[in-house]
Amino acid sequence: MKKLLLLVLSALALAALLTGCGSGGGMLTLNVYNWGEYISDGSEGSLDTIREFESWYEQEHGTKLKVNYDTYTSNEDMYAKLSSGAVSYDVVIPSDYMIARMISEDMLLPLNYDNIPNYQYIGEDFRGLYYDEEDKYTVPYTYGVVGIIYNASKVDEADAGGWDLMWNEKYSGSILQFNNSRDAFGTAMYKLGLDVNSTDRAVWDTAFDELVAQRPHVSYVMDEIYNLMESGEADIGAYYAGDYFTMLDAQAEGVDLRFYYPEHTNYFLDAMCIPSSCQNQELAECFINFMLSRDVAVANAEYISYASPNSLVVNDPEYIEDMGPEAMEILYPELESFRESYNLYAYRNLDAETLDYINTLWENVKIN
Amino acid sequence: MKTVSRVYTALMLVFLFAPIAILLFFSFNEGKSLSVFSGFSLKWYQELFRDRDTLTAVKNTLVLACTASVVSTVMGTAAAVGISRLRSKHLRGVMDTVTNIPMVNPDIITGISLMMMFVFIGSFFGMRTSLSFYTMLIAHITFCLPYVILQVLPKLEQMDPSLPEAAMDLGCTPLRAFFKVELPEIMPGIVTGLIMAFTMSLDDFVISYFTQGNGFQTLPIRIYSMTKKTVTPKMYALATIIFFVILALLLVSNIPDREQDGAAKRKNK
């Protein structure tokens, strides 16, 4: 027993030793709140964005800077934390619908774009999007499109092409459906050509019937999809284009994963914003500007492997070469106008009543 | 009957350890997958030790767990001694229930109510941000306390009350009697309480999430936030290391016990 106590105490001493480096005085701090695994962090030889910014800032401005970089799991978690007023962050990177909600609740500060000269490189198509029509609050970071991934060694080419592959009884048992209401209903609604942002209950009921019809043939998963698709246990599933490459990298022998976009589908866009609790707006804008500079933006785009709205990235020969022609084709599908498709088909924030109704329907889909 | 119980034990062990075994195995995978083993490599261990943010999170978690468990053990032991000396049965019942509340209360409710309290007090003093390392520490002490009390109280009750009395009879001051006689008697309970508190603090996610301040992220929060993309195999490597450290600690702490047992047996002969 005594030895155990000694062990615990020595562990304690070790921990105390490790904390020796507290926060120094007179140092600037920048608090960044981002999704997990959503920035190039120096692993596998990539650029360590945060350290890079710290040393760049010190060189440029002569002041030591410490970036506190925290991560969250979902827009809702982030919203709960920020709206409680318990924490203050200088830069957050929420998704589109959450940005719309935060703007309507005065939780974001208008940006001073004079401090973000690199904003000029953001493509024309990514301005004036519905969540921030006048481009006052946001700087787009990444975007992505949902498509269908299938195993070409099991699935007949002729069946691929549309959403109905996910309803094809031939592949019953090896189809994966999203395990969250919004995305699952989305697949049914795009298939039927319905408006995914409808507030009409009858529209949702129609989609509900479609999901009920699909239920015997599918399993509901979220990020388990990676392992199921890679190993060939499942053959069909819908997910984000960027994540398809992760699966492709790890596919087992005999599995031949392919990807295509059905005619209408969901788009998401995550953008950098400054919340109203920000303590140093100029510094935050400096960080956002830094994130848009060529080297950093390319490193992030390659690390996250979602599409980048930054023209410095999209037109960069090194980036194009690193990603390869196939990936470029998938990540940046030829759209007549991203803005138009996005404003038409992307999910928006729904009112609480509709959301409640959808969730009730969703529970019924899963229980039945 | 014997085969049934053997099969049952085997099944139980499989269910307990298969997930850990899989994790161990795939931490040595060259690829990123959890289903396809593409070759042996120590790559993810290298990546782990290059990942400063994860290492900071490990450090934060350890600092928090050590501080919280030590503080809650001291406070909990004192509380248990106090409770055991209450004369009124009624009051004791009340104290028992009150100290158990943080244990039975769902984590999410404890977490949110603590956060709201911190925000309330913070705004009272006009602070911009009310959450910090200290709020997280207070929260961890809060939910660790009942486990310590629960471990120490029975030991105090098992102890022969005439022991400290005898010590005082022989000239000890009450304080000295406590440290010389009572404390060694209840030590096993205190140590178990400390270990319990340490484990509880180490793996708490929900309460930590709601009371976490800027720039002090713990490991469970960091791992959980990776689920937007996939959890990287770095984490399997980390889990493997943690598993072996704990295994080593358990082995080391069990050796002296066996020697003592042996000595006790020899004496009894």
Image (spheres, coloured by chain):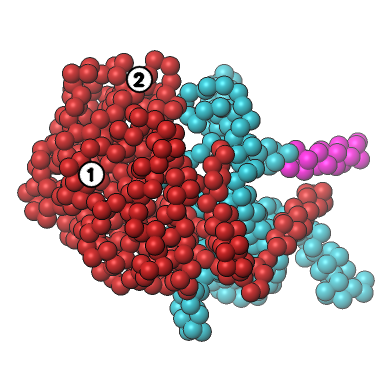
Q: Quadrant of the C terminus of chain A?
A: top left
**Camera-nearest residue between B10 and A292:** A292
Magenta stretch prevailing secondary structure: helix
Name above or below for residue A4 compared with residue A222.
Answer: below
Q: Residue furthest toward the bottom?
A: B125
Viewer-proximal residue among B142 and A151: A151
Element type where label 2 sits in the image: loop
Q: Chain letter of disc 1? A: A
Q: Position of residue A266 (x, y in %)?
A: 23, 44
Q: Mark 1 points at which residue?
A: A266
In the displayed structure image, the side of residue B134 where residue A241 appears, left or right: left
Q: The red chain is which one?
A: A
Q: Are marks 2 and 1 in contact (CB under 8 Å)?
A: no
Mark 2 belongs to which amino acid? Asp
Q: Residue B194 carries which label?
A: none
- Above or below, comparing residue A130 to residue A309 in the picture: below
Residue B39 lies in the magenta stretch: no
- One can see residue A88 in this view: no
Residue A303 appears in view: yes
- Pick the residue in front: A329 or A203: A329
Q: Is residue B92 left or right of residue A139?
A: right
Query: Residue under mark 2: which chain is it in?
Result: A
**3D distance between C-alphas at marks 2 and 1:** 25 Å
Tell me which corner region of the image, top left, top right, bottom left or bottom right, holds residue A43: top right
Q: Please give the residue where the numbered disc 2 appears in the rendered image.
A: A256
Residue at (31% x, 44% y) in the render:
A144
Instruction: Describe the element under mark 1 as helix, strand or loop.
Output: loop
Q: The cyan chain is which one?
A: B
Q: What stretch is highlighted in magenta?
A: B249-269
Residue depicted at 83% across the width and 67% down the height: B179
Residue B83 figure quarter: bottom right
